[in-house]
Image (cartoon, grey):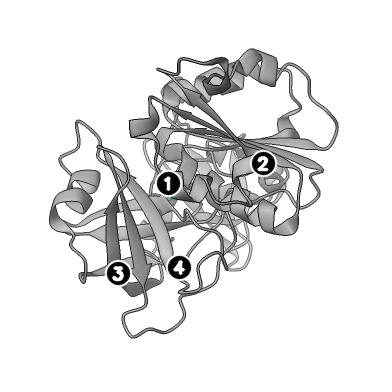
Amino acid sequence: MVERTLTVRVARIRRETPEILSFELAHPWGRELPGFEAGAHIDVKMPGGFARQYSLARAPGVSSDGRYLIGVKREGASRGGSASMHERVREGDLLPISAPRNTFPVQADGRRHLLLAGGIGMTPLLAMAQHLARRGADFTLCVFARSREHLAFADALAAPDLAPHVRLHLDDGASANEKIDLAALLRAHEDGTHLYMCGPAGFMAAVRKAASHWPEEAVHAEYFAAPSDSSVPAGRPFSLRLTQRGFSVPVAADQTAVDALHDFGIDIPVSCEQGLCGTCVVPAEGAGAEHRDFCLTSAERQHKVALCCSRAREQELVVHL
Ligand code: FES
């Protein structure tokens, strides 16, 4: 389900790499699109009925036309989302999207920002880097790609205000300038430095391992899919207490809180249903939750919960619905 749908026109499609297309999305009648913060993503509903989340790859204000920019990698095994975007969407088409939502914000109090991007995971980090460049912040954007041919958004990376902050790692790079040693890069954590990562599962695991000694609150990740090593324990039944409505809803062991609420006529918007996108997050007494999402920070988990995946730690979870 796409939440708060608006319609955009596909203004431009550009081939970035053999596997990645970028799409510029504009208001159909030239009006302004809703504002957003760097790091935000939108849900795109595409031909065939698929809905996918894509990060906005350009910070607000970087382009005078105000268009949204997304990058879509064609996944080898895809018969659905990314294949539909690559094969069936043309310039001029209208697409329903959600309003932008940000579960991966730049930390406003950070003194230094280290952005690590693997492949198509560059999209949110590129927008964050542009935002930081405009603020004159201290940051480095490290981009990991197979080769120059597989480097998306090369024009944006070469922009004069960004280029001095960009480091490239190319798997086939011949010179030391084209290699980044993750362990060396992340060996020391300095107070006030924040690490942001986005990329495929193997890349995320490698960064997590190299940064395992970093404080949890300094590490921020945006996942494409739930990490495969996240062994989710079996669910237990619990009770969902709704403080505003004044009653409780039973959640069976094989049910999500979203499904249980639906049975009571209460529909919570969902999109990814994997704890990634933040669509189903509601205010809650977070300490009572067994958080199974990948989108909330530890601070947010104190007062929010993602109802598509999280459960109660004990018998009851209290949500402010
Ligand atoms: S629907 Fe995406 S986090 Fe719950």
Mark closest to the chain's N terminus, 2 or 3: 3
Q: Give coordinates of residue 243: x percent, y percent.
A: 63, 62
Task: Quote the CA–CA distance across marks 3 and 4.
Answer: 18 Å
Whether label 2 lies within 8 Å of ligand 1 gets the answer no
Q: In front here: 269 or 247?
A: 269
Mark closest to the chain's N terminus, 1 or 2: 1
Q: Give coordinates of residue 98: x percent, y percent.
A: 40, 66
Q: Residue at point 42% right, 84% down?
A: 31
Task: Quote the CA–CA distance across marks 2 and 3.
Answer: 46 Å
Foreground mark, 1 or 2?
1
Q: Is residue 82 left or right of residue 142?
A: left
Q: In front here: 92 or 233?
A: 92
Task: Quote the CA–CA distance across marks 1 and 4.
Answer: 23 Å
Label 4, residues with CA under 10 Å away: few <14, some 14-19, many ≥20: many
- Name the residue that disc number 3 marks: 11
Mark closest to the chain's N terminus, 1 or 4: 4
Q: Is residue 101 above or below residue 181?
A: below
Circle 2: residue type: Gly
Q: Which mark is residue 288?
A: 2
Q: Residue at point 40% right, 39% down?
A: 120
**Taking the image as drawn, is residue 276 in sight?**
no
Task: Quote the CA–CA distance across marks 1 and 2.
Answer: 43 Å
For the residues labelled 1 and 4, say whether their Cβ atoms are less than 8 Å apart: no
Q: Which quadrant: the N terminus?
A: bottom left
Local secondary structure at mark 4: loop
- Name the residue that disc number 1 marks: 153
Mark closest to the chain's N terminus, 3 or 4: 3
Local secondary structure at mark 3: strand
Circle 3: residue type: Ala
Q: In front here: 82 or 1?
A: 82
